[in-house]
């Protein structure tokens, strides 16, 4: 059973870069059977998919955030990271790391989620 | 983007009664090649991450009680709780994984 744990600063200043890490246990970040995703939840916008990374180097980002988002992996630490640049107060949210099955080209539902981490954007 | 609209926004149901939540998609999420609907349902309790209940619109996740069922095809879907229990109080979301950007419905709050 894959387990995910988010970590990072809980407070980020406006215009700076939000950086979060998701540590995966119970499986390899390099697996071709799974993809890794970031999702956020704010009171104003509900659940919003941020981006997905499959294997190493295949990424999909939400066009609404595309120019500000970068996902990467550190295979030595079994971690996937999220960077969101030029943040504003509207980026205040609980950020979740999630995973699902990659099956023959299909990205299936989000089967496992981390507990989430609250990130507040404020000076 | 595919927009998912849930109804109602909130629902008060007596213990043991049936609860039905609707999810309407702005376009079909039925893939004709494999005849599968790319829709999942999640349950979220306060302070917890969402938990998948149903995927492929009607396949129950392992360990999910059989009082939860999903139905529908194409653009219109339902989540039914056949006999509401106290532990089912939560917010329920539908989500499509047919096309990026993957999107969620706005949520339906179920109360006793």
Image (cartoon, helix red, strand yellow):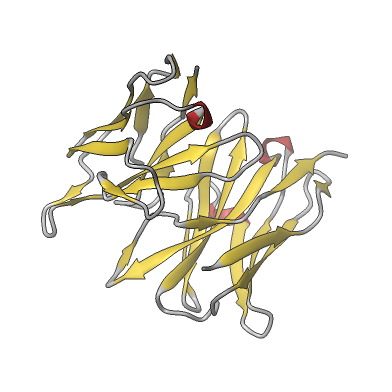
Q: Quadrant of residue B42?
A: top left
Which residue is outermost to the bottom? A76
- At which x and y percent is residue A19? 73, 60
Figure check: A90 above or below B102: above
Figure check: A105 above or below A13: below
- At which x and y percent is residue A101? 39, 66
The quadrant of the image that shows the N terminus of chain B is: top left
Q: Is residue B1 left or right of residue A71?
A: left
Q: Nearer the viewer, residue B32 or B41?
A: B41
How many numbered badges does the structure rendering display? 0
- At which x and y percent is residue A13? 83, 46
Figure check: B9 above or below B64: above
Figure check: B40 above or below B12: below
Q: Quadrant of residue A75?
A: bottom right
Measuring 60% from the left and 28% from the top, which residue is drawn there?
A44
Measuring 29% from the left and 51% from the top, which residue is drawn there?
B98
- At which x and y percent is residue B23? 31, 30
Q: Is residue A58 left or right of residue A38?
A: left
Measuring 81% from the left and 49% from the top, which residue is drawn there?
A10
Q: Quadrant of residue A71?
A: bottom right
Q: Is residue A110 left or right of residue B44?
A: left
Which residue is outermost to the right? A123
Q: Nearer the viewer, residue A85 or A101?
A: A101
Measuring 61% from the left and 63% from the top, which residue is drawn there?
A4
Q: Nearer the viewer, residue B21 or A118?
A: B21
């Amino acid at each position: 059973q894959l387990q995910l744990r988010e970590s990072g600063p809980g407070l980020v200043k406006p215009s700076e870069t939000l950086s979060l890490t998701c540590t995966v246990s119970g499986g390899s970040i390099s697996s071709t059977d799974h993809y890794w995703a970031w999702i956020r939840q704010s009171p104003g916008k509900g659940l919003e998919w941020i981006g997905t990374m499959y294997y190493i180097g295949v990424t999909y980002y939400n066009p609404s955030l595309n120019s500000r988002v970068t996902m990467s992996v550190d295979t030595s630490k079994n971690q996937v990271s999220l960077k969101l640049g030029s943040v504003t107060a509207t980026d205040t949210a609980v950020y979740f790391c999630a995973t699902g099955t990659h099956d023959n080209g299909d990205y299936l539902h989000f089967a496992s989620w981390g507990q989430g981490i609250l990130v507040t954007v404020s000076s | 983007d595919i927009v998912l609209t849930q109804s109602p926004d909130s629902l008060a149901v007596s213990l043991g009664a049936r609860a039905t939540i609707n999810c309407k998609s702005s376009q079909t999420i039925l893939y004709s090649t494999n005849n599968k609907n790319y829709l999942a349902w999640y349950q979220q309790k306060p302070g917890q991450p969402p938990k998948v209940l149903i995927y492929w619109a009607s396949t129950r996740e392992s360990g999910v009680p059989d009082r939860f069922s999903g139905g529908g095809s194409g653009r219109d879907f339902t989540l039914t709780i056949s006999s509401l229990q106290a532990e089912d109080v939560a917010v329920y979301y539908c989500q499509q994984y047919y096309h990026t950007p993957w999107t969620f419905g706005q949520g339906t709050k179920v109360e006793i």
